[in-house]
Every structure is written in C-alpha cells, then in structure tokens.
Amino acid sequence: MDLVQLLQSVVFDYTLRTVTLGAALLGVVSGAFGAFAVLRRQSMLGDAMSHAALPGIALAFLLTGSKETSVLMAGAAVAAWLGALLALGIVRSSRVKSDSALGLSLSVFFGLGLMLLTFIQKQPNANQAGLDKFLFGQAAALLERDVLAMAAFGLPALLLLLLFWKEFKLLSFDPEYAASLGLRVRLLDVLLTSLLVIAIVIGLQTVGVVLMSALLVAPAAAARQWTDRLGTMVALSAGFGALAGISGSLISSLVPRLPTGPTIVLCVSSLVLVSLLFGARRGLVWAWLGPRRTAVAA
Amino acid sequence: MSPVSSAIEITDLTVAYKEKPVLWDVDLSVPAGVLMGIVGPNGAGKTTLIKAVLGLVKPSAGQVLIHGRPYAEQRRIVAYVPQRGSVDWDFPTNALDVVMMGRYGALGWIRRPGKRERELAQEALAKVGMADFADRQISQLSGGQQQRVFLARALVQDAQVYFMDEPFQGVDATTERAIVALLQDLRAAGKTVVVVHHDLQTVSEYFDWVTLLNVRKIASGPVAEAFTEANLRQTYGGRIAFLSNVPSAGVRPQAFASGE
C-alpha cells in the first residue's frame, strides 16, 4: 500500500479513521497531563492508577452486566482513584515510602483485576467476551461513539487545563508557596489528579492498563529534551502523543495482526530515543560532540 | 480596635509532628518595622514557626495575628520566601516567570499575568541585581541567583510583613550583600521582616531584633538585650563556647568547640 492509498483509507475507511482519530485524541490528552505528572514526580502514580483501573472495569461489568464504554470507564475511574487513595493512606499511616506504597497499591489492584477477569471469563454468559482487551488495548474495536466519549471527556479536561494554567503551574513548581498565597492547593491537587485519571481512562480501551503509563511519561520525557518553557513542553508533549497515536495506528493497519496499542507505545518510545539523542536542549549527541559544538550552539 | 503596634502576635503556639512537639507554647510579639532574625539549633522549629504563621502546618494549639487579624484575612500584606531547596530548579521556566508567580495571589483565579505583572517582575529583578537574567532558565542560575529570584518573587507581592526562610544559606558574597541591602531597604520602607538565620556571627550586624528558639522561645527582643551569652547558652546547650561575652560588640561563638 503506498502513501496515497494509506491517506485515502484514513479518510474513507471507517475503522482506520476511527482508530486513528481515537489514538490521536488519546495522545494529545495523555501527553498534556502526563507532562504535569512527570514535572510533579508522579509518573509512578500514573502507572499505579492505570493498573488500578482494571478491577473497576471488571466490577462495573459484574454489577451492571453492561459493556457500555461509559459504564466501564466510570468503573475504571473510580478504581483508579481508590488505588491512588490506598497508596496515599499507606504513606500517611506507616513508614512505607511513596514509591513502595504505589507499588503495593498497583499490584494489589492489578491482581484483583486479573482475578475478576478470569472469574468473568469462566462464566457461561456469552456476553463476557472481550473484557480482556483492557489489558493491552484493542484499538481496532474502537467505535465512533467510543471516540466521541473520549472527546466528551478529553476536550473539557484540556479546557480546564488552559483555564487553570497559572494555578496548575504554581502547584507543580512550588505548592507551599501557592498555599501561602491563598491558592486552594488541596482542591487544585484533586482537580489535576482527576484530570490525570480522565487521561488514563480515555486510553484504556486503546492501549490497555499495562501500557498506559508509557503514554503519560514518554511524550513528556521526550518534550522536556527540546524546551525549557512549560507551555512549549506541554504543547510538544501533546503533539508527540498525537504523533505516536497516529503513526502507531497507521503502522499497525499496514501489517496484519500487529496490535495497535503496543505499536503506539513503540512509536512514542522511538520519539523518546530520538529526543534523548538529538534534543535541542540536552541532546546526548551534542554533549558527545564536545565543547566546541556546544560553544557554537550557545 | 486598640492601636496595633505589633506586626506579628503569636500566642500559645504549639506544633507537633506525630506527638513529638516541634514548637512548644511559643508566645511572640514582633513590633512593626523591625528586622528580626530567628536563630536556634537544627530542629529547633525555626522553619516550622514560619510555616505555622503562614498556615502551612496546622498547629495543635495557639493563635497567630498579623497586624491584629488572622493570617487568612491578611494574605495580601504578607510575603513568603521559602527555602531555596524546597523546589525543583529543573522546572521548565525562566527567572521572570518565577518572579511573576508572586502576583498570582493578587490576580486571583483564572486571570493570567499580563504586561503590568511583567513590568513589576522586571523591576523586582532589577532590585536584587538580576535584571539581566530575566530570560534565563532557572536551572542555569547559581544558587545565589536562585535565592535572589525567590526574593524578587516576594518583593512583587508588595507586602507589609516578609517571612524569609534561610535566605543566606549557601549563597555567594555578592548575593549576601544584595540580600543585606534589600533588608535595609525594606526596613527603611517601614516593612517588618522575619528571617530564619543560622550564622550567629552576623546577627548583630544584620538585624535589630532577634528571637532565640529551641522548641520553646528562649528569648526575644532587641539584639542588644536578647542576644546575650546566657540566652545563647540556653538555646544551644553546652555545644558552643564564646570568645567574647559582650553582647553589643557582637557575640563570637565557635560552633566546633564544645564545653567551656
């Protein structure tokens, strides 16, 4: 298939169009909020919350018997929040440090999710098939209304990010100072974390709970290599996320049986590699080339 | 209301982390317009005192008034300079941007900083000798320059009462001079400044008021009255010996000598 054909099928092929659009949307949202998670040193939190979403999906199905995207997403969001709260509770009430607490929370919730998933699959009910797509994602199964649901949550989330830009910026850089100014730091923290949960939930269907954190962390890590401005970094991160989403969907549509989610993750990883090597600000290649090259660049 | 002459009035302030008291029953009255140093050994609760006043840590008991009213009502007249090490200087932003953050409280929700905030920030940077570094990424600044950016951020708050947590910690001579000059300017403008300080040798030189703290308040008052050998001994225990015990000439403690 040549490039023209590929572009034609993006426009005219329902499945490919839906998948590409969904992946791009997911990339933008997770890239933008992932940037804040990375700057606030909460990459592990993102990972823990993605994994913690799994039992929520399974329980939502068990309780309602519905596989409606919005129902499963709501379950995922609640479970992701509970996972984060469990980790926070462990840190507050014991001597366990936050990275270990997040690890604990992640494995407990993910284990519970796998158990529930196995239980569901052993039931005679024929309706149960397909829930395991949330493990590694199944972009090909995306429907137009799934993408609409992603947009319905993702776009308002991005709007809120723009609206509270200066508040989120100060919260991320210096939360105590923000509190001294009278900013409602606790409220802002809950809001920003909730928006991160939205970014995660949006991505679960496409890339799955296991690989979701890559889409939060990788675009941000790549973007940081190119700029020293927060606005540029978040925009670049969103752009890298979209680029990975689009290229991942297209590549997987060209090769039979190539799963979309992992392909997207490999695409975003390549962006990280290129950025680490050639990033304008901190590229390793420029450092290796020695002080002469640096002097010219400066 | 009675004429309020004290800028900061602290009554019965007690702060505990998990049952362990960090500050115990502190009463403190700071007159308006003084330059006050807070000194005491590590773990004496100096930073906690400031944070409790600013409502950043919850006291178990006690009350704090700023110019006669609770802090929550007086935020606009209070500015805060946290310890430089409390933030990640690798954050993607530049010096001017950090200074503008000082205006976020006055701007209120959602409103973005604009031309006026930019000018105020530029002015404040000039006051601390950092006018040429406005566009500099903050990780590219020296420790002293970062400290001056934090001071400029407090300056744009245009406050009456300033709290500074260890501004002299690990700074170069240029920055030290800049901070001292700034403190003098603030006093000349009638502001009240409270500085957590660790260098006993410079207390008499930099400040006109001092509080000695070690969980409890040991002493507080004009440097000539409160900064005595007896009070210092009580604050630091037997860990410090003094070469001179004439307070007005400046106490010269030797931190390494123990006992007499």
Image: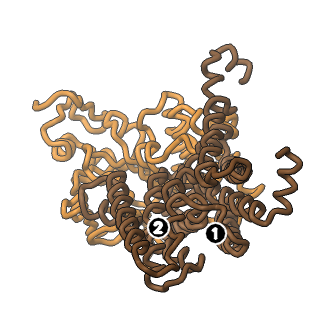
Give how far across and how far down residue A219 sits, in percent.
62, 47
Please tell me how crowded label 1 is: few (under 14), some (14-19), or many (20+) other residues with Cα within 10 Å. Answer: few
Image quadrant occupied by the C terminus of chain A: top right
Give the mark count: 2
- Residue A104 is left or right of residue B127, and the answer is left
Specify the subunit that label 2 lies on: A
- Residue A102 is left or right of residue B185, and the answer is left
Q: For numbered disc 2, what is the local secondary structure?
A: helix
Specify the subunit that label 1 lies on: B
Give how far across and how far down residue B75 sits, in percent.
52, 67
Colour assignment, chain A: brown
**Quarter-of-image position of residue B163:** bottom left
Disc assigned to residue A53: 2
Colour assignment, chain B: orange
Disc assigned to residue A195: none
How far apart are labels 1 and 2 at the CA level? 35 Å
